């Protein structure tokens, strides 16, 4: 439907490179084509709205039953999503509880230390300061880490990313509003490039803030760091030394980038309890920052493609049915692919979906056809 609206907004005179023969072959044809005898003319309205209008004009049955079925289908989908979220939440809870029980009983770790190790598994930091020493625990860790990375890590990371994205989006909107006010609202709409730049700036600030939190917590309030594992090691033990701001900054960057060398790690239950939340949020912010930079590169590539001039070879590529004419649908389809906005696989899936609706293969979808599909 959105693609149809876009097609309807394009200038019609720029699309014709030859005489059009008969009706438009695509599902988003417009009124510039000659009507077929015995059939109503093509309309520039969105395809689904046009189908419903034509179905009502042709004396199609009442669509209230179809509307009711569509509402029931939407409600069923919402219930399915809620059930799926509950099941995923239960899966995460069961996974965490199993790890807590096994680590506390098998390795005699505290609850905080067990959660600390589980967080390292989820964020893939992997300090290596707390390690399983028994053969049975190592075998269990093989299965536990595999299931955690494949199933649980994706779920927890998605939740953390959503929370971070929400906070960063609100901050980005405030920055954009402030910029618009400073320029006396000279531009009513911010370009995509400006929004991406603000997103990069916001993600970087959030990432830097999480590093600063780690520097303050582990540098100002930390006591020492040790080069060997254990529950807690005082600074007077061999291999331990006082931890300053340089070591805390080093540890924060290595941790939040998920490198996790393990030479400088949190010590004691208090620091490990703080690190549980800090690693989850900080690693998510680092991922968002990297993703924002990747989006900037992708947008620059699309901007370069948009500046590509129209040539005779490109027009010939658009004319897929070789009728010496380029329809709106053919033009939009090729340009969407060349600009990287949609893949050929996605367009093929959309066309197949329309083909399932258009049972008569006449380039139109009536309300009766939609009703039969919804009933199925």
Image (cartoon, rainbow, N blue to C red):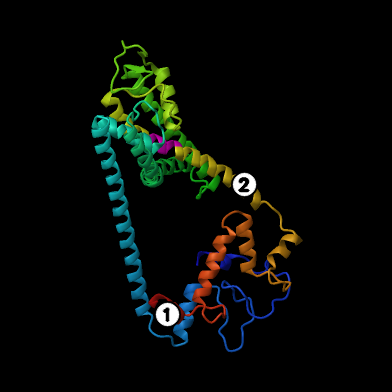
Q: Is residue 183 visible?
A: no
Report if the CB atoms under discs 1 and 2 are less than 8 Å apart.
no
Highlighted magenta segment, given as a residue range: 281-286
Q: Percent position (x, y) of residue 365?
A: 50, 78
Foreground: 34 or 64? 64
Q: How many marks?
A: 2
Foreground: 57 or 285? 285
Name which residue lies at 29% across and 39% down: 99
Q: Percent position (x, y) of residue 19?
A: 72, 76
Q: Is residue 350 left or right of residue 16?
A: left
Q: Percent position (x, y) of residue 290?
A: 50, 38
Q: Is residue 252 left or right of residue 341?
A: left
Dot 1: element: helix
Q: CA distance from mark 1 to mark 2?
A: 43 Å
Query: Which numbered disc covers residue 107?
Result: none
- Residue on which the image places disc 1: 372
Name which residue lies at 35% across and 41% down: 144
Crowding around mark 1 (Cα neighbors within 10 Å: few <14, some 14 to 19, many 20+) is: few
- Residue furthest to the front: 135
Is the residue 276 above or below the residue 319 in the image? above
Dot 2: element: helix
Foreground: 122 or 351? 122
Residue depth check, mark 1 versus mark 2: number of the one nearer the observer: 1
Badge 1 or badge 2: first in the primary sequence? 2
Crowding around mark 2 (Cα neighbors within 10 Å: few <14, some 14 to 19, many 20+) is: few
**Picture quadrant where residue 146 is located:** top left
Name which residue lies at 24% across and 30% down: 110
Query: Which numbered disc covers residue 301?
Result: 2
Q: Is residue 12 left or right of residue 157?
A: right
Q: Percent position (x, y) of residue 14?
A: 68, 66
């Amino acid at each position: 439907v959105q693609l149809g609206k876009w097609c309807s907004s394009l200038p019609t005179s720029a699309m014709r490179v030859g005489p059009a023969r008969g009706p438009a072959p695509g599902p988003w044809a417009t009124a510039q084509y000659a009507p077929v005898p015995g059939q109503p003319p093509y309309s520039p309205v969105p395809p689904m709205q046009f189908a419903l209008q034509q179905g009502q004009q042709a004396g199609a049955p009442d669509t209230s039953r179809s509307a009711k079925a569509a509402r029931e289908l939407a409600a069923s989908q919402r219930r399915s999503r809620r059930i799926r979220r509950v099941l995923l939440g239960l899966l995460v809870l069961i996974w965490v509880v199993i790890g807590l029980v096994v680590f506390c009983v098998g390795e005699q770790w505290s609850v905080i230390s067990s959660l600390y190790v589980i967080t390292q598994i989820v964020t893939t930091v992997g300090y290596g300061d707390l390690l399983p020493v028994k053969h049975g625990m190592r075998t269990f860790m093989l299965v536990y880490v595999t299931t955690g990375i494949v199933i649980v890590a994706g779920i927890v990371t998605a939740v953390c990313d959503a929370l971070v994205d929400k906070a960063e989006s609100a901050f980005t909107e405030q920055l954009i509003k402030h910029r618009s006010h400073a320029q006396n609202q000279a531009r009513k709409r911010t370009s995509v490039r400006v929004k991406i730049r603000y997103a990069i700036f916001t993600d970087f600030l959030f990432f830097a803030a999480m590093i600063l939190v780690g520097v303050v917590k582990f540098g100002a309030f930390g006591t020492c760091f040790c080069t060997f594992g254990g529950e807690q090691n005082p600074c007077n033990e061999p291999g331990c030394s006082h931890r300053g701001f340089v070591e805390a900054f080093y540890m924060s960057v290595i941790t939040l980038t998920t490198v996790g060398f393990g030479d400088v790690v949190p010590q004691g239950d208090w620091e490990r309890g703080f690190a549980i939340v800090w690693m989850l949020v900080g690693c998510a912010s680092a991922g968002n920052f990297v993703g924002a930079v990747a989006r900037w590169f992708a947008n620059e590539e699309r901007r370069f493609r948009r500046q590509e001039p129209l040539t005779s070879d490109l027009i010939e590529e658009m004319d897929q049915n070789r009728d010496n004419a380029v329809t709106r649908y053919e033009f939009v389809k090729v340009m969407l692919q060349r600009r990287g906005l949609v893949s050929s696989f996605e367009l093929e899936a959309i066309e197949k979906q329309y083909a399932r609706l258009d049972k008569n293969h006449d380039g139109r979808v009536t309300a009766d056809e939609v009703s039969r599909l919804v009933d199925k």
